[in-house]
Amino acid sequence: MHRLFLPGPLSGATVGLSAQAQRHVRALRLREGEEVAAFDGEGGQWRARLLPADRLELLEFDAVERELDREVELAVGMPANERMDWLVEKATELGAQAIAPLMSTRGVLRLEGERAQRRLAHWRGVAIAACEQCGRNRLPRLREVSTLQAWLRGLEPVAGEARCLLAAPRGDAAAARVQPLALWAAALAPAQPVLALSGPEGGLDEAEIDAALRAGFVPVSLGSRTLRAETAPLALLAALAACAGRPA
């Protein structure tokens, strides 16, 4: 069954299709009377039927969820060009609950004002399309674009939150503190929320790493290979999904 995202909340007997949903219906060549799954990004989905005049009849609600067993937020030094689009798409498919796009010292991408808002709207569209494709019924939250230092200063304490830094500090003494991802993930309590910070193409600089460590982030190793900026946070998500349901 094809899936359509509609801004919610969805209620009543019928709802109108948004402009984006209308384009999706035309692209799929769907006809009046065909059934689709409709969701508003806040959980669950509707079995629905296409009506004339770009409307949808809501038939039956299904509270099905396809989320990870814990909330995972990715704070990422934005990679340039289409790589950030790819990261948002795949992070949505893998179950990220929120994504915070950050500007850091060595990052190439700089976004402010109207340009930042346009890019956020674009990424939200990428996340919607990913949810329609993968069967997820909750949209990840996209935070406002921020500098890394400002984002760290604004972090609120969250009870039980596990914070990890996907960048090994330099130097022998600091490197000794780095934990293998598998061991770190295995020690998490069931449903414990995770906040992961990763750098851009050039990595985080020394001052940024020090600031993250002071904010309670634990350095975690993803292995002996150097991963791209858009790959590292996805490797974390995949590892957390793989250990879902295992005893801590």
Image: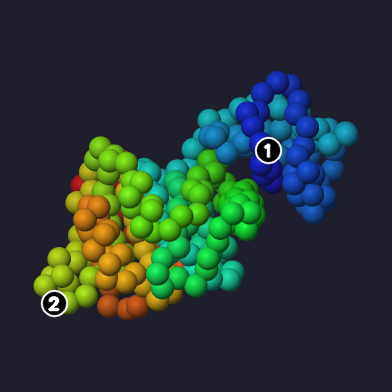
Q: Which residue is mark 2?
A: 172
How many labels were placed on the picture?
A: 2
Residue at the location (88% across, 33% down)? 52
Residue 168 x, y percent position in the rendering = 25, 70
For this rendering, which residue is in front, 76 or 228? 76
Q: Quadrant of the N terminus?
A: top right
Residue at the location (36% across, 57% down)? 149
Residue 244 x, y percent position in the rendering = 33, 49
- Label 1 sits on a secondary structure element that is loop
Residue 107 x, y percent position in the rendering = 45, 70
Residue at the location (23% across, 63% down)? 210
**In the visual, does 92 lie left or right of 195?**
right
Q: Which residue is mark 1?
A: 6
Amino acid type assigned to the residue bearing label 1 in the image: Leu
Mark 2 neighbour density, 10 Å: few (under 14) some (14–19) many (20 or more)? few
Residue 179 seen by the camera: yes
